[in-house]
Amino acid sequence: MVDHAPTAADKNKPAFSMDRKAGEHARTRRARIALAHDWLVAMRGGELVLDRIARIVRADHTPANLYTLFNSGAKLTEAIDAFPRVASRLNKLPMSGKLRRWMLAMYPSGVESLRIRLDRDHEHEPIGLLISTSSCAIKALAAPPGVPHICYCHTPARYLWSQQDEYSSGRGLAARLRKRGLSSKGDALREWDIKTVRTVDVFLANSNHTRELIQNVYQREARVVYPPVRTEFFTPATEERQDFWLVVSALEPYKRIDLAIEAAIIGRKRLMVVGSGSQAKALRKHAARVGKQVKKTRGVAGSVEFLGRVPDEQLRTLYQRARLLVFPQIEDLGIVALEAQACGCPVVARRAGGALETVLEGRTGSFFDEPNAQALLAAADACPKDAGENCRANAERFSEQVFDQAIRAEIARALRSGQR
């Protein structure tokens, strides 16, 4: 965890002024803590962080509600599911399922509906702290007056600030609709995103990369708390590795799975793709199209197998057997790259973003600079083969135990601040 001096913006924020009921509650040993998360629909990297925070709150304090823009009702983990879920008014709309990403312009009103509900819940039974985990809009949820708000920020919204082109450049009708929506509503959403920064008292960043984005976009300091990696579950195996590449990712435009597909097919490699998302159909078509082109010119092409979402046990086996993991996107940190290394699997990553903090060049993987298939192939050739011990040692720096200690310290600090 890294400490930083407060900026002028931080110094201008009002000191906590707890109302009487909230102050009395915060002074008890077990505070009531509410959580907030962008949406609860599936388990991905952000939900793994939420799960760990939920475990800590359940163990040390008293869980309040879990507030979210969208709730599919899916069971996620025991810790997350133990929190009563409160969804925004947007969740009642017919398009709130798979089309929730097209509702960007409505997110501010959804967050406001949650604020009203949170205030009402606080009046009924005070909370001592709000913790949000955000990569989109939920960081804008204002806590009741005098209640501290910690935001664990995975990134300022990518589609607004850092990866607009990637979100607009996907394949198919969905990408064209996304591009049109961002073009017409982007400025207003950015203005709202900046305006609501004041709802957050403490920013925690999941990497130094994200810390810099928070500083550049929001003009706020953040402390770095790396996300938890399940190093006790993801472990190496004794059998030899097989000659296939692996991708584990949401199939979304900014993940750049198309680069991995092109490199594998051109390089005559076998690629297994784990994950689901809005680009699944378009990526399958892309793989078929590239395969036909390569066969026509070279006679032989690599193969791509789409596995969809797989159980954790199968994912662990894939990590344990793959020759390497391809990590072609610019990521805020990337728990997947660390899960692979925990299993002894080296990583070929884009030389940018959080990968610079998780991959050790020449020891646990290799980098490519240009986003094209040839650069990725060259990096794959340079990827170390006997990297198992180095990969495992590197992943252990990001264990759940390290995360738990840091989050407990942040919760204690916020509750102390709220009592002043």
Image (cartoon, helix red, strand yellow):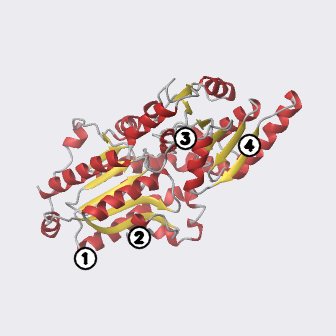
> From the viewer's perspective, is the residue at label 3 or at label 4 nearer?
4
Res 217 quadrant in image: top left
Question: Which mark identifies residue 124?
Answer: 1
Three-letter amino acid code at disc 3?
Gln
Do the residues under discs 1 and 3 have CB atoms within 8 angstroms?
no
Mark 1: secondary structure = helix
Is 84 placed above or below 321 here?
Answer: below
Mark 3: secondary structure = helix
Closer to the N terminus: mark 2 or mark 3? 2
Is 177 placed above or below 112 here?
Answer: above
Distance of label 2 from label 1 (alpha carbons) = 17 Å
Do the residues under discs 4 and 2 have CB atoms within 8 angstroms?
no
> From the viewer's perspective, is the residue at label 1 or at label 4 nearer?
4
Distance of label 1 from label 3 (alpha carbons) = 41 Å
Question: Which mark identifies residue 304?
Answer: 4
Residue marked by disc 3: 164
| Drawn side of residue 126 relative to residue 204, left or right | left
Question: Percent from the top left, x then y, of residue 36?
Answer: 37, 60
Distance of label 1 from label 4 (alpha carbons) = 55 Å
Question: Percent from the top left, x then y, of residue 348?
Answer: 57, 31
Residue at 68% from the left image edge and 38% from the top image edge: 244
Closer to the N terminus: mark 2 or mark 1? 2
> From the viewer's perspective, is the residue at label 4 or at label 2 nearer?
4
Residue marked by disc 2: 85
Q: Residues within 10 Å of mark 4 (few under 14, many from 20)?
A: many
